Every structure is written in structure tokens, then in C-alpha cells.
């Protein structure tokens, strides 16, 4: 999905801004940085917030500025400003070099080698976000809300947030890389409360797309929301208590996606493995020596791939200028590869696999997942279900969490059904999967062909916190003989 | 910057807006992150952001403007967007000023602090002295100045400066402890104490064994209790209640905690969350959210207050009301008495990943991290790992039996968003689950 080269200048970036980015890197080298990079970003963000049929507010922000990261005397320094004057850019370069030199590390930080890259990339839009009137964007969520209100059951709380983001970046480093990019993204978040005979069920979903306004049709936003509301009413009206004990589980793409993200993607982040996130997002049950160890059954492949077309975390080059590629994190059930940036790769004696990203100009790029998913195989969903004598088919979840070493995960069903003698029968409520990571992945005996990767999370990490676009999904999976309650 | 705020408001009104607010914030914060007992990166910011709120015929638009050279054009664009938007019938205006604000000053020693390495080293050394092998965390010097103008007569300046340090100490992957230090005066900043606390817990948490499911009496350390207090503050916002994201809907005047529990939001008191005014320019005040176990108020801006037929509590954010700083009223117990009354239970020191199955009912779970200790007759008799607190928010608060006399100011990444003053607490019969075999 790499588009044509940009004309210069482009939206949100004028020539003076771009020249200052080049200047920042040159000036940092003059000040004694052994490595320097500067990232200028201009982001426009629109959020339409509809609560209980009222358009509460429209948020429209333009975030722009420059962040400079340097290596000097073995220390790492980062500084940022939104004032694009030569004086202020000089000031942040001075800041970054000074604080890097002050680190006084025993073992100097270094970056794994990379070839310089000069590139332009962009995500094409069938219908440009900038061409869609505000009224049309608002109407999209108002329309969904109207359809929900027309349903013949109680939905006492309805909250929608439709968000559109357009990110222009210009990255330069002292090794000769110069990369320009444009990335438009569309999201729909909704939170619903459905009531029936004094009981309530709640859901929230987040769908995302890299591209233009065609997203609303491609993601089938209207159908998804209405279908989910109906399933909630059905669950309240007919749902039974979920059975307890060891049984088979068929997990839909949303459930396999959250498991892929939480219990594979996060524990294979190299910075976490090396302790850099220990006080915040935590560490990992995986160590540098874990490559090659079994963590799942032989049918399990979990990938992270920034190059998935239209995945919300699509990118061609990461925020260190490294080319993006697919990473097989768990392959054939074996721990295969970590997510690396140039700093972690140098420590672990390998190369970056293009996993460095930042949420904005004013924060450093760190190791992140992109689009993380269970790689599909050849099973049909019906085929997997037909092989279950007694179990649960969990399509979606509500509550979830996992410990900070990514070993004990919990996913509680939102939409789930009993499977009896190979047939999906009645809805069951609040099915709890509370298993260790190896128990979960070790129980998988079949993986479907139904790849879906448009569930879009905000993945939280780092300090200051960086809530980053990340897609999670995958194929349906069948797990044999796991304890559910 | 006062001129910039004034210019934004004047421009919006000249373009036909009925209400306008501009809060220009100048950020000069500085941070050091450390891991493996060394500094991994230092960060510094020089940023100016104008948070703007404007209303054209009940059409509400909010924005953050970063390019200060194009303010007029950006305001024009926002008004154009507002005109294309839809009316918000629930919008009830912004508070009528002018307001008088408390005279508050910041510690010049914090403003002048240019190097935090000594604080980082003091925390790491303290943790290592206790037996830790590996320390990670962050040191922050927060330095922000706000210049606020509203079209309803509010005008204010607020300098906010504080120091913060968070340290996690590890003896091994599963033996860890966490400590934090928060201060608005340099003389009261104690990173060493935070390091000792983290190191002590880590050393005590050696060789944990897998925990068991069941109902347990729990001693909550201030850091994890701060997380539960943060849940109360977060769920008490009127906007949150209206969106279905709170168990406190229709519970005003009702019992939501035990008699021991009083939780106050107070942006005007000394804390690292202190603010002179909210996003509408209303002077911050002290409000009991929960008093002796009874839910007394939601947190409001002008619009939500009108909806609930009350007055604003001075908690306006750009769009929805939020807590400023939370204070759990101290109890009458000593820390030792809290432990002595725990005959057969657990001492939890930290948590993360608090998530709800139903916000309406308050059914949730959260994962204790760092030291988890088995307590019998007030004494630590073992160390656990791999458990989850699975219960109901209101049930947990109703089960609180005792609170310590002393409270700690805590704030922590991901869990204690709002600066919170938290005591040690004893709660009875709290649900614990664990991963199945």
C-alpha cells in the first residue's frame, strides 16, 4: 500500500518546517551527538461524540511540532517543541544533547546498524477524509443511533465516538535517511447498554481502518452495531449461565485477536523483555533465551504485520526509518521472534524489524505492536464447531486483563453460545476464560480461515503514556479441553 | 500568553460564538526514565498549547491549537466547523465570572531544578540497599503555566509545579515492589523513601508460590487503595454516569461504601493535582463525593449540573467533568492495627489492569502486581503470585472496615490517574480468582 511520492510541500508542512527538520539533525551533530534524528509531525484529529442521541461535542485538533532524539556520550536524550522557529529548534537540540550527555551510563547505548533510506509513502484514500463534509461524518453516527432507537428493545445508554486522523510525518536522521509519509485513519468506537427485565448487558467495540471515508462501508459499521445490539438483547432474553468445567472452546476472531495482542504481542516486545518498561507496562515471562521454546500447539502462528493493507496500524517504514515487515512472533507454537527497535536489537545482537513507533512528535519512538493476529489456516468455522460435543463458542468479550508478565490472562464473554453435539444452541452469559498463556495457546487444535483484523485498540505503553493505534484480530480457533466457568 | 488567550476568545465572539474559553498552557516539564539501575532516556519539552472551547448556537466545538502563528485562521476554521455541526440541547452555557482565586505560589526550588539525577540515584540506591537487584522507573519535574480567559468573565493564571518519582524494584521477575514520591515542595520530596519501600517489598516477596481462589480479608497498601479510590472519582463524573459507564447512576443519597469511607475531590488543596480553576474558570473547591459511605454528589460542569438540577462542582474538563485530586479521609487505626485485625488474609501492594464486565453493576477485576503476601494473625507468613481480585466495586467499598490514620499521596501510571491521598485499608471477604490448571 505504498503510494506515489509526495509533492513538496504537502498539507500541514511547509518548506520552512521541513528545512528546520534537516537543520535540527545537522545542528545536533555539530553539538556532539554521535547519532541524531528529527521527526516533524502534523496530525489533524476529528472526534464526533454522540451520547444518547445528543452530539455532545466535536473535537477538532491540529497537533504539530518536532521531536529530536540524540545519542551523545552513550546516553539518549529527547526534546520536543511545537514552535517551528530556528531559535526554538536550536533550543530543543541543545536540551537533547545536554541531557543525553548527563546520563553517565556504565554501558553506552548504541543502535543496531541500518542502511539510510530515502522514501515517500502514503496510504491511498478512495474517498478523501478532507473531502467529506462535517455534516456527512456526523450523519454516519446519527444514522446508527437512529436505527438503534428503532429496535424494539431498551438501549438506555448509547455512546459513539467517530474519529478521523490524518498524520503527515517527515523523518530525518544523521545517517542519511529522509522519509516522508501520510497516513489517514478512521475509527468508530461505541459503547452500548441494553436492558431487559431489570438486567443489563454492556459492550464496547472499536473498529479501525487505514484509508479514507470508504471505511464506513468497508467496515460495515452500521450492520455491526445493529447486529451486536440484537445479540445483547438475545443474550439477556435467552442467555443461560455459562457451564463450568473442562470443555472445548471455539474463539472468534475478536477473542483470538485480544489473546494474540495480550499474550503474544506484548510478551515478545524486546524492550519489555530487557526491563525498559518494568515500572510501567511491566516485563515478560519470555527472556532473551526463550527463542525456540514451545508456548503453544504446533498449529499456532501469531504474527505482527504493519504492512497489512488497511489495518489501522499500517506503515511502510517505522519511526526510526526501518522498513516494515511481517514478524512471526509465535511460529508453529514456538517463540520465534521479538519485536525490536534499533536499541533493543543492538543489545540482543540482532537487527531491528521495524517496530519503533511514537504516537506524536513529542514522544520517543519505542517498541510497539502494529497489526497483530492469529494467522489463518484452513478450517471452516462450521467444521470446527461440528467437532465439539460440548463447549462454548465465544464471539466477543467485555472484561479482560492480563498480568504484567503476560502469563495469566482473563477474557469474559460478551457474545457467547453453547455448543452441543456439534451445533450452536443457546446463548450463554459471562463465560470466563482465565488461563495461563501456555495453557491457552497449547490447547489450540484448529485454526480457521476467517481472518478479520479490523478491531482497533489503543495500546498503552511508556511514560509519558502513548496510547497507540493497534489492530488485533485473526482467525477463529478451537481450543480443546480448557477450564471455563 | 494572556494576550493569546484573550485574542482567541475575542475572535470567537466576533465570529458569532456565544461562549468561548481559551486555556493557553506553557509546558516546560522534564523527565528522566531509568531501567536496569541506569538512565535510559531523558526528555524535555518546550510546548505551548491553547485548549479552546467554543459554542455557536449550542453547537459545541473543542480543540487544541498548537500552531500559535495561525491562531486567527484556526479559530475561523473552528467556527466554520461549529456552524456545520449539530445543536446540543443539553448544553447549558459556561459559568459566569469573574471569579476570585486563591493566592497560590509554587516552590521556586522546583522551578529552578535543572537536573534530577541525584533524585534518581537516591531512589535506586535505597532500593538496592534493601536487596533489590534491578530498578526501573521515572522522575518528573512538572512545570506548567496556564493562562485562562472565558467569554463569561473568568480570567486567571495558574503556575503548577511538582516533583514525582516512581520506582519499581525487582529481586527477580516475580519478586518486586513499587514506591512513589509526590511533592509540591522540594523539601518534602523523598525519592529515597520511595526506593526503600519498593526495595523492601521486593525483598520480602522472594520465592512466591501460586495463590488460591476464594474470599479473603485484604490489607490494601496505599498504592492499590489509591487505584480503588481513583475508580470512585472516575466513575462519579456526571458525564460518565450519563454514558452508562458508572455503577453510581441513581445512587445519589444511597449507600455505596461502608460508614468508614469519605472520599473528597479537592483541586484547591495542596497536592500535585492542585489547580486554581477548572476548564470553565470556576474556582476549584472541596466536595465530598462519598461521605460516611453515602454517595453525595457527582462531579459536574455547568451543563451536567443543569441536567441534574444542581450547581457546578468546578470539575469541568474540555468536554466532560473530571476529578482534580482525591482525598480519602484518614481513619483511626494505626498501620499495625490494620494488619493485626487481618487474621487470615492477604496484603496487596499494587495492581493494574482494572477492567469491568459491567460498569452499571460495577462487576470488575484487577490484577495485583508486585508483593502479594499471605497474612495470618497480622503477620506475613508467605508470598503469593498469579492471582486476580474479582469482585464488585460497590461490594468492595462496603466491605472496608478500617482505615489508617496516615495517608500517602500516590499517583501511578495506568492505575492511579488522579493524584490521590490513600491510607492503608482493611476490607473483608474480597473475591480472589486465579488461572485454571
Image: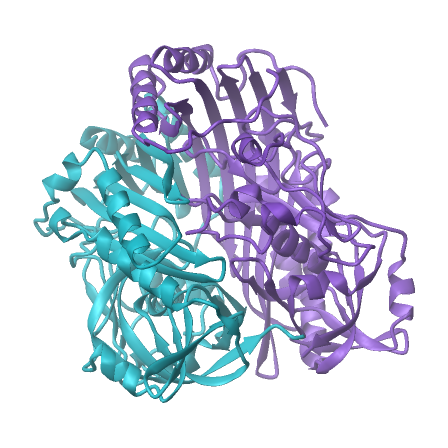
Chain colours: A purple, B cyan
Q: Position of residue B404 (x, y in %)?
A: 23, 77
Residue drawn at 40 percent across, 58 percent down: B90
- Comparing B367 with B289, the one in front is B367
Residue drawn 52% across the image and 76% down it: B211
Name the residue furthest left. Answer: B103
Q: Is residue B303 visible?
A: no
Residue B207 screen position, x and y as percent: 48, 68
A155 to A299, vertically: above or below = below
Left/right placement of residue B88 relative to residue B99 reads: right
B405 and B375: which is toward the camera: B375
The quadrant of the picture occupied by the N terminus of chain B is top left
Residue A111 point in image, percent of width and height:
52, 26
In front of the other: A323 or B97: A323
A36 shown above or below B181: above
Percent position (x, y) of residue A20? Answer: 41, 13
Labels in figure, total:
0
**Residue A198 lies in what quarter of the image?**
bottom right
State whether residue A268 appears in this view. Answer: yes
- Taking the spot 47% from the left edge, 23% from the top edge, the residue there is A39
Q: Quadrant of the C terminus of chain B?
A: bottom right
Q: In this view, does B356 lie to the left or right of A212?
A: left
Apparent side of residue B342 relative to residue B390 in the rendered image (left or right): left
Q: Name the residue nearer the viewer: A199 or A485.
A: A485
Asked if residue A458 is positioned above or below residue B322 in the image, the reply reads above
Determine the image quadrant of residue B301. bottom left
Q: Residue at x 20, y 44 (%)?
A: B160
Amino acid at each position: 500500500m505504498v503510494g506515489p511520492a509526495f509533492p513538496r510541500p504537502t498539507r500541514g508542512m511547509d518548506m520552512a518546517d521541513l528545512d528546520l527538520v534537516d537543520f535540527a539533525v545537522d545542528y545536533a551533530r555539530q553539538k556532539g551527538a554521535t547519532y541524531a534524528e528529527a521527526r516533524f509531525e502534523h496530525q489533524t484529529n476529528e472526534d464526533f461524540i454522540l451520547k444518547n442521541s445528543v452530539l455532545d461535542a466535536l473535537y477538532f485538533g491540529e497537533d504539530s511540532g518536532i521531536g529530536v532524539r540524540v545519542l551523545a556520550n552513550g546516553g539518549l536524550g529527547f526534546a520536543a517543541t511545537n514552535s517551528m522557529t530556528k531559535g526554538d529548534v536550536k533550543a530543543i537540540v541543545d536540551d537533547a544533547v545536554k541531557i543525553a550527555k548527563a546520563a553517565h551510563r556504565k554501558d553506552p547505548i548504541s543502535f543496531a546498524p541500518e542502511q539510510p533510506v530515502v522514501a515517500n509513502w502514503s496510504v491511498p484514500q478512495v474517498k478523501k477524509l478532507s473531502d467529506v463534509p462535517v455534516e456527512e461524518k456526523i450523519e454516519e453516527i446519527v444514522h446508527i443511533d437512529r436505527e438503534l432507537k428503532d429496535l424494539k428493545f431498551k438501549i438506555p445508554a448509547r455512546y459513539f465516538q467517530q474519529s478521523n486522523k490524518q498524520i503527515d510525518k517527515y523523518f530525518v536522521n544523521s545517517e542519511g535517511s529522509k522519509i516522508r509519509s501520510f497516513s489517514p485513519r478512521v475509527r468508530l468506537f461505541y459503547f452500548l447498554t441494553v436492558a431487559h427485565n431489570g438486567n443489563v448487558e454492556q459492550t464496547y467495540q472499536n473498529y479501525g481502518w487505514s484509508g479514507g471515508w470508504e471505511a464506513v462501508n468497508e467496515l460495515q459499521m452500521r450492520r455491526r452495531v445493529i447486529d451486536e445490539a440484537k445479540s445483547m438483547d438475545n443474550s439477556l432474553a435467552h442467555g443461560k449461565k455459562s457451564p463450568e468445567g473442562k470443555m472445548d472452546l471455539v474463539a472468534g476472531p475478536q477473542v483470538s485477536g485480544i489473546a494474540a495482542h495480550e499474550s503474544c504481542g506484548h510478551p515478545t516486545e524486546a524492550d519489555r523483555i530487557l526491563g525498559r518498561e518494568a515500572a510501567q507496562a511491566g516485563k515478560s515471562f519470555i527472556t532473551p533465551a526463550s527463542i525456540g521454546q514451545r508456548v503453544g500447539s504446533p498449529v499456532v502462528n501469531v504474527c505482527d504485520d504493519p504492512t497489512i493493507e488497511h489495518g489501522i496500524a499500517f506503515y511502510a517504514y517505522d519511526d526510526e526509518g526501518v522498513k516494515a515487515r511481517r514478524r512471526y512472533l509465535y511460529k508453529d507454537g514456538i517463540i520465534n521472534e521479538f519485536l525490536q527497535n534499533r536499541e533493543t536489537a543492538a543489545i540482543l545482537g540482532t537487527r531491528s524489524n521495524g517496530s519503533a513507533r511514537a504516537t506524536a512528535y513529542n514522544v520517543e519512538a519505542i517498541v510497539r505492536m502494529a497489526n497483530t493476529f492469529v494467522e489463518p489456516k484452513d478450517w471452516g468455522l462450521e467444521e470446527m464447531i461440528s467437532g465439539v460435543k460440548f463447549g462454548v463458542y465465544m464471539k466477543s468479550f467485555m472484561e479482560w486483563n492480563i498480568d504484567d508478565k503476560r502469563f495469566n490472562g482473563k477474557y469474559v464473554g460478551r457474545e457467547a453460545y453453547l455448543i452441543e453435539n456439534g451445533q450452536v444452541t443457546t446463548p450463554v452469559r459471562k463465560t470466563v476464560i482465565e488461563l495461563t498463556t501456555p495453557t491457552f495457546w497449547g490447547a489450540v487444535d484448529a485454526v480457521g480461515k476467517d481472518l478479520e483484523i479490523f478491531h482497533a485498540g489503543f495500546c498503552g505503553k511508556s511514560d509519558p503514556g502513548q496510547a497507540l493505534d493497534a489492530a488485533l484480530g485473526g482467525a477463529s480457533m478451537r481450543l480443546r479441553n480448557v477450564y471455563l466457568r | 500568553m494572556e494576550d493569546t488567550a484573550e485574542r482567541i476568545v475575542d475572535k470567537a465572539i466576533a465570529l458569532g460564538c456565544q461562549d468561548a474559553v481559551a486555556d493557553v498552557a506553557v509546558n516546560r516539564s522534564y523527565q528522566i526514565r531509568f531501567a536496569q539501575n541506569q538512565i535510559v532516556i531523558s526528555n524535555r519539552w518546550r510546548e505551548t498549547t491553547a485548549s479552546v472551547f467554543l459554542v455557536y448556537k449550542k453547537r459545541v466545538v473543542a480543540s487544541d491549537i498548537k500552531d500559535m502563528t495561525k491562531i486567527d485562521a484556526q479559530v475561523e476554521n473552528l467556527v466554520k466547523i461549529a456552524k456545520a455541526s449539530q445543536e446540543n440541547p443539553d448544553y447549558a452555557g459556561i459559568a459566569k465570572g469573574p471569579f476570585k482565586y486563591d493566592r497560590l505560589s509554587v516552590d521556586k526550588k522546583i522551578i529552578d531544578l535543572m537536573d534530577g539525577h541525584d533524585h534518581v540515584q537516591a531512589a535506586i540506591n535505597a532500593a538496592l540497599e534493601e536487596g533489590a537487584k534491578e530498578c526501573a522507573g521515572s522522575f518528573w519535574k512538572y512545570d506548567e503555566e496556564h493562562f485562562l480567559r472565558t467569554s463569561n468573565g473568568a480570567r486567571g493564571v495558574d503556575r503548577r509545579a511538582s516533583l514525582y518519582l516512581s520506582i519499581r524494584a525487582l529481586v527477580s521477575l516475580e519478586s518486586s515492589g513499587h514506591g512513589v514520591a509526590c511533592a509540591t515542595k522540594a523539601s518534602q520530596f523523598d525519592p529515597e523513601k520511595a526506593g526503600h519501600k519498593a526495595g523492601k517489598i521486593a525483598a520480602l516477596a522472594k520465592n512466591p508460590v501460586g495463590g488460591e481462589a476464594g474470599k479473603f480479608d485484604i490489607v490494601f497498601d496505599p498504592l492499590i487503595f489509591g487505584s480503588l479510590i481513583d475508580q470512585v472519582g472516575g466513575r462519579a463524573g456526571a458525564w460518565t454516569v450519563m454514558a452508562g459507564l458508572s455503577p453510581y447512576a441513581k445512587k445519589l443519597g444511597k449507600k455505596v461504601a461502608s460508614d468508614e469511607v469519605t472520599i473528597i475531590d479537592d483541586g484547591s488543596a495542596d497536592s500535585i493535582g492542585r489547580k486554581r480553576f477548572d476548564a470553565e474558570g470556576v474556582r476549584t473547591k472541596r466536595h465530598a463525593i462519598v461521605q460516611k459511605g453515602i454517595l453525595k454528589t457527582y462531579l459536574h460542569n455547568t451543563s451536567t449540573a443543569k441536567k441534574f438540577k444542581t450547581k457546578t462542582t468546578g470539575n469541568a474538563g474540555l468536554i466532560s467533568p473530571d476529578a482534580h485530586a482525591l482525598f480519602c479521609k484518614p481513619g483511626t487505626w494505626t498501620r499495625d492495627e490494620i494488619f493485626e485485625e487481618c487474621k487470615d488474609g492477604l496484603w496487596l501492594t499494587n495492581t493494574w489492569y482494572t477492567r469491568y464486565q459491567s460498569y452499571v453493576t460495577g462487576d470488575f477485576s484487577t490484577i495485583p502486581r508486585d508483593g502479594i503476601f499471605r497474612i495470618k494473625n497480622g503477620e506475613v507468613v508467605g508470598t503469593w503470585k498469579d492471582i486476580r481480585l474479582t469482585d464488585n466495586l460497590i461490594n468492595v467499598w462496603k466491605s472496608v472496615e478500617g482505615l489508617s490514620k496516615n495517608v500517602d499521596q500516590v499517583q501511578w501510571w495506568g492505575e492511579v490517574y488522579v493524584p490521590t491521598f490513600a491510607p492503608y485499608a482493611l476490607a473483608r471477604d474480597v473475591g480472589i480468582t486465579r488461572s485454571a490448571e
